[in-house]
Amino acid sequence: MAIDAATLRIGVGGFFGVLGADLRRWLGRRGLFHLILWVAGINGFVYSVVATANMPFGPLGYENLLNALMLFPVFAGIILTEATVVGEYRSGVASWLVSKPVTRGGYVAAKLGALWIGLAVTAILIPGLVANWWLPKVEPYRFVTPDAPSLGRFMVALGVTMVVLGFFIAVTGFFGTVIRRRGPVALLVMILWLILRFAPPQIRPSWYRYLPTGLMKADLDFNSWIPGMEYVHGNPFDPVSAVWATAALSLMFVGGAMLFYRRFDL
Amino acid sequence: MTVPAIEIRQLKKRYRKVEALRGLDLTVDQGSVCGFLGPNGAGKTTTMKILMGLIGPTSGWAAVHGIDVRGSGLLARSRIGYLPQDPVFPPYQTVRSVIATVGRLYPGHLRGSALRRRVDELIDRVGMTDKARRRTAGLSGGERQRLGVAQALIGEPDLLILDEPSAGLDPTGRRDMLNLIDEIRAETTVFYSTHILDDVERVSDTVVMISRGAVVAQGDIDEILTVSDTDYAVRLRGDTEALHDRLVAESWVDKITTRRHGDIEDWLVRLSDGSAADRLAPALVESEGHDIVEFHLSDRGLEEAYLALVGADDGD
């Protein structure tokens, strides 16, 4: 079906209208709350690990930072996405919004996009930068290499974490539109997180590295670095193909959610 | 010829075993205030939700200002302001931010101070100035209805669809809502559903009555209330059962709607044609066991018209 220019303009306007409304919320009290929570929480966690000499992985300040960013914000993303997609469907807020000049697909994409931007900035970017400022200053300096990583490499590692966050927000959004029940959606996605992160190397097929696993895999004994850390340490960025694959998969899940959201009565 | 504000043809909607709409046909002219009347479950909300693209019809066609709501739903919705039956807004948003958010969703919307002024104007218009900064989670049902009307008006729509706008309002709120509908009739077409017949008589130009998913009457209020030469009001006292059974068996009687108050029974008798009145009067007189208190052509109000057309049906 051909879409005329007027319809496209209205659709794009509706998408940015919903996105803007949600982003304004992140610029307000909600954003401030998250910012304080995440800066204090992530940095407090990393400091407690770094400053505890007898912990087996205590010295790896940056490793712990990236692990924390790969865990807590992602789980928060799953919960918040579920609360938004399923919660607004069940409460009637979604029905109210899509009765305006907003496409259902635009509504879902805007909601997921705003969540990703909001969490990526308040729970990953800013807490990560704050940690990057104080970590090299901690005495005794416990980072595994003598020098702090370059800001560029560290930012890329944060970017990888944001891509992983985006993937789980997209997956939760997709299952949220399909299942539309809060408990099962979160459970399903968290199980997926566990599989992608901790599936033992012996059972991983060769193509597994192209999945988000390539960005987030970790061994249960924590004897190897997570992929982002490889790059932070100056190694070639092996999982670069996984970045593209994860981004593409994320877009596919968002697209699936957008398509599926058109199929049911509100 | 002016395109109707709403045009619906043979609209059907089936929910599994329930047929909510059974070939609905209706037309609402531009610039009118149209009351959409029907018992619970008659299909009013379903019809409105189909117009808003919230549910899809099983078959049939609906258009707003000539725009097909299925094929070009987005375009149609850009010309509609909608108040749902139980309006729900994001609980974290304030009254002002809800209206501003909706305002930004409409094409060519106001921006900056112009948008703020328009939001304040609407808040004032629905009497919520002192609650402008309150979060929607703390609003009463009546306040949510008022906010619902304000957000429906922010896009300056050509058509306002209000699903039970006065439901849950106290008498003052209901009066204010009717005054508001009366005020905005100069700006837009209003299509609203209600159970309250007095409201329809007070503010509507036209009315559509619906029962069991199909329209049973539509037109100007005056037309609906016009005395028909086939409708007779009969008031009886005593045992009326035998008479009732005898009359409903007659081929020249279409329908008898009855209402009892104590020992008095009011009938609205619809005849197959006006000439059958010559048979009705003798039949009433000849029958025994009751007194005829009144017998005349029905000079019905909307309530009588509604009961005659919809009957005591409470929907499905």
Image: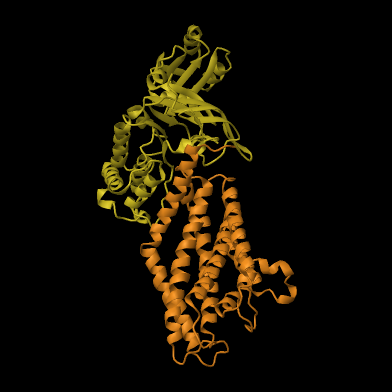
Asked where in the image residue A71 lies, by quadrant, the reply is bottom right
The total number of labels drawn is: 0
Q: How far across and how far down the image is residue B145, in percent?
A: 36, 44
- Any idea which chain is the orange one in this picture? A
Give the quarter of the figure containing the N terminus of chain A: top right
User: As displayed, is residue B298 above or below residue B58?
Assistant: above
User: As displayed, is residue B218 above or below residue B46?
Assistant: above
* Residue B172 in view: yes
> Residue at left 52%, top 47%?
A104
User: As displayed, is residue B165 above or below residue A120?
Assistant: above
Q: How far across and how far down the image is residue A93, in percent?
A: 46, 51
Q: Nearer the viewer, residue A190 or B42?
A: A190
Q: How far across and how far down the image is residue A185, in percent?
A: 59, 61
B121 left or right of B159 in image: left
Q: Nearer the viewer, residue A244 or B196?
A: A244
A173 left or right of A9 in image: right
Q: Colour of chain B?
A: yellow
User: Colour scheme in the image?
Assistant: by chain
A9 left or right of B246 in image: left
> Residue at left 36%, top 42%?
B109
Asked where in the image residue B121 lies, by quadrant, the reply is top left
> Residue at left 52%, top 81%?
A62
